[in-house]
Amino acid sequence: MTRQVRCECGFVARGDSDDAVIQLVLAHVAADHPDLVELETADYIRGWIELLPE
Ligand SMILES: [Zn+2]
């Protein structure tokens, strides 16, 4: 099942596993929201994951 995380800026990350989508969001936060890097940890992002019906 596809995992999705939507950033408040409109960025959408999708992946086939929790870890894959978390890595995409971490990279996005580092690139576009560097002031949030310390807040948005992997465990925090995990709480945003939505499961998309296929
Ligand atoms: Zn963003």
Image (cartoon, rainbow, N blue to C red):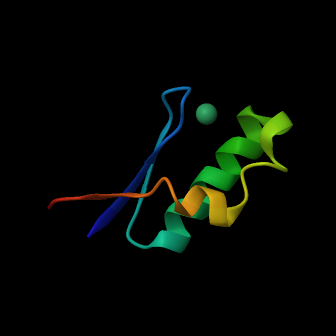
Query: On the rendered image, what quadrant is the C terminus found in?
Result: bottom left
Left or right of 35 in this view: 17: left
Counting from the top left corner in percent of width and height, residue 4 is at 39, 53
Q: Give above or below for 28 relative to 24.
A: above
Counting from the top left corner in percent of width and height, residue 1 is at 26, 70
Q: Which residue lies furthest to the top in this view?
A: 9
Q: Which residue lies furthest to the left in this view?
A: 54
Left or right of 4 in this view: 28: right
Please tell me in which quarter of the rendered image ligand 1 is found.
Answer: top right
Q: Give above or below for 44 relative to 32.
A: below
Counting from the top left corner in percent of width and height, residue 7 is at 53, 37
Left or right of 8 in this view: 34: right
Please tell me which residue lies in front, 9 or 31. 9
Report the residue at 77% width, 45% height from top.
Answer: 30
Report the residue at 73% width, 59% height from top.
Answer: 41
The image quadrant of residue 51 is bottom left
Report the residue at 85% width, 35% height from top.
Answer: 35
Counting from the top left corner in percent of width and height, residue 43 is at 65, 66
Q: How many labels does the image show?
A: 0
Report the residue at 67% width, 64% height from top.
Answer: 42
